[in-house]
Amino acid sequence: MPAHVNAPLAKLPDGQEFPLIIFSHGLAGQRRMYSHLCGALASHGYIVAAVEHRDGSAPTSFIYPPPSVDGETPKPEKVVWTDWKQLAYNDPSKEESHVPLRDEQLRFRVREIEELRKVLVRIMSGEGKHVEAMNRRKGVKCAAKDIDWDRWTGTFDVDKDVTLMGHSFGAATTLRAARELPNFARCVTLDPWSWWCTFPPGAHFVPFTAPRGDINVPILTVNSEFFALWDDNWRAIQGLHMNQKARDKEAWLLTICGTLHTTFSDLDILTPRLAKQRGLTVSPLHTLNTIVDLSLDFIQGRAGQGRWQSFSRNERDETLAKRNETLAKRDESDRKGDRIKLGQPGEIVLHVRTKESAHS
């Protein structure tokens, strides 16, 4: 992989700034799982800040406490994956639902994004060396070092042209943060999980009200075919985009056919045979590059133009209805292994488009 460790920041013409992307990982993920996606976006002239959430959603994350009063360096604290089934609540009616945990995790994640912005403000304001001095991960493998922080001063603005981006639960984090935090220009959500609409079978819990509140920035959602066929999740995400469209807000909802939920990360590149066995029918590398291209089109105001004119425009529910009707006519033995598809491998299906492009 052609890359340089701790490469210097590219030079900018006087008076220009780099646009900023803040990226949030999904459940059981971490910041390094999206190296191709984030790296490719950075190669197009974006500063990409990938958060590693310490809300119990990553497999493992480490916190490095400050030295004790006697100068001893304590051992790092390990934050591991939290399973909602292992939790006990004061209210017994909540014990059979993942919703209370996910709600608290989202609150934690939004606060982490707030803290990230504060750190970025300090770096942009010329305090990069002080930020590095506060970093207690020195000596840790892969920790940043030998960075010329002076070159970062004034190179970006955390209150202007900032894109929120995330995958799965990270996409849900993006939507929550866009509702609650100011000064974001747009959202890019990849396979967003509408966690409030999906409960385990037979769960019983006190009535829970799904998050409400309009999102007042443009939204692009790119679904894998795997997630687009998840009916409950689909209806919630489609409803979100239709609501945006009804309010004359920019909203785009796409599906890339032949893809899996993991295709947005590095996993399918690293384990291509396993991905193929799980149903991947497209090149994972090519698909990630397509996701980058779609994201850049949206961020740079080209959504709906050029190649977007050639995207298929089928209604998902009609497609599934016809497919199910065909399957119903077959014997059970003929239906085994027959996978429902929205289109041909690699085909991009446009489900919801902003009103401005409805006529195109």
Image (cartoon, rainbow, N blue to C red):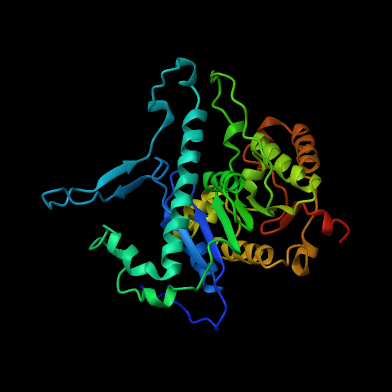
Q: Which residue corresponds to the image point at 73% horizontal and 63% vertical from the top-left?
A: 303
Q: Which residue corresponds to the image point at 56% horizontal and 23% vertical from the top-left?
A: 201
- Quadrant location of the C terminus? bottom right
Q: Position of residue 39 (x, y in %)?
A: 49, 67
Q: Farthest residue toward the bottom?
A: 13
Q: Farthest residue toward the right?
A: 359
**Residue 183 shown left or right of residue 106 in the figure:** right
Q: Which of 18 and 225 is in front in this view?
A: 18
Is 86 situated above or below 312?
above
Q: Is residue 151 visible?
A: yes
Q: Can residue 7 be seen in this view?
A: no
**Residue 334 shown left or right of residue 146 in the figure:** right
Q: Nearer the viewer, residue 262 or 249?
A: 249
The image quadrant that residue 334 belongs to is top right
Q: Position of residue 57 (x, y in %)?
A: 42, 42
Is 300 situated above or below 238?
below
Q: Where is residue 25 in the image (x, y as percent from the top left)?
A: 48, 51
Q: Which residue corresponds to the image point at 57% horizontal and 55% vertical from the top-left?
A: 164
Q: Where is residue 177 in the image (x, y as percent from the top left)?
A: 56, 47
